[in-house]
Image: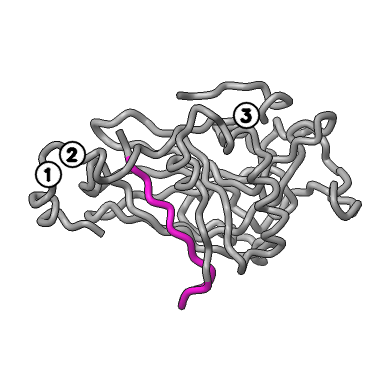
Amino acid sequence: MKISLPRRKFFGLGLGALAALPVTRSLAQICGEATAEQPLGPFFPHPGTLENPVSENDSDLTFVQGRRGMAEGQIVHIVGQVTHDCHPISGATLIIWQAGHSGRYNHKGDAESQSFLHPQTGELIRRTLDPSFQYWGRTVTDHNGNYRFKTIVPGFYPADLQSGWYRPPHIHFLVSATGFPQLVTQMYFDGDDLVDNPWIQELNEQDFLLQNPNMSDEQKRKLIVIFTEQIDGLTGRFDINLT
């Protein structure tokens, strides 16, 4: 179920093993629920909406081609597999977009609350653009349905200062695959190796979109990705199950 709210209001089983399972259980039941839909939000990078235009939209958001410097923030790798009823989907297109380290989107519509006080520490946070961050990316799944992005942990930001609602760090996903409805969802963060993770979890618990009662507990849990230190850095797995 999609939610459309104005900003101030919302803001390994193998296939061989499956044959031995009781026929009364469908593949969808065995493989888990479909990945929950989440709102597109107001900051999708449509042509002409970027405040700081960038020409690249590859899978590494930590630098911008032709510009010097690296993106601010904690670098993370997101890996996963796009599937349907346990079967991998090759050639699926994934587009992601997110706020930068300061909690600001590279979007002309993100004009509110350019600075605010951290509700816990009282620190003044200035929501500035990072010219070395790509802000959105694109990739295509391989023949096993696998994908990978390299990016940074986005900052949190106020969705509605009057009510004290702050959106937790999250990344928007748009997934398109031939023969399947387009999926829009959001991925959230967890993990002891994340900077200020207790605060991130507090924001997760209070977020109206992540805690949407129309989602099952399993769907909510699968939107939250645990990041841990791996050989190539801080990595989390976000698998996407299409209907």
Q: Disc 2 on helix, strand or loop? A: loop
* N-terminal label among 3 and 2: 2
Q: Position of residue 111 (x, y in %)?
A: 77, 33
* Res 42 label: 3
Q: Is residue 29 above or below residue 68?
A: above
Q: Mark 2 near mark 1, Cβ–Cβ under 8 Å?
A: yes
Residue sitting nearer the eye, 34 or 4? 34
Question: Measured from the top left, where is residue 50 in percent x and y?
Answer: 64, 38
Q: CA distance from mark 3 to mark 2?
A: 39 Å
Secondary structure mainly formed by the magenta segment: strand
- Residue 22 is labelled as 1
Badge 1 local density, few (<14 within 10 Å), some, or many (20+)?
A: few
Magenta region: which residues?
229-241
Question: Label 3's element?
Answer: loop
Which residue lies most toward the bottom here? 231
**In this rendering, is residue 234 above or below 163?**
below
Task: Specify the label residue 25 is tagged with.
Answer: 2
> Mark 3 or mark 1: which comes first in sequence?
1
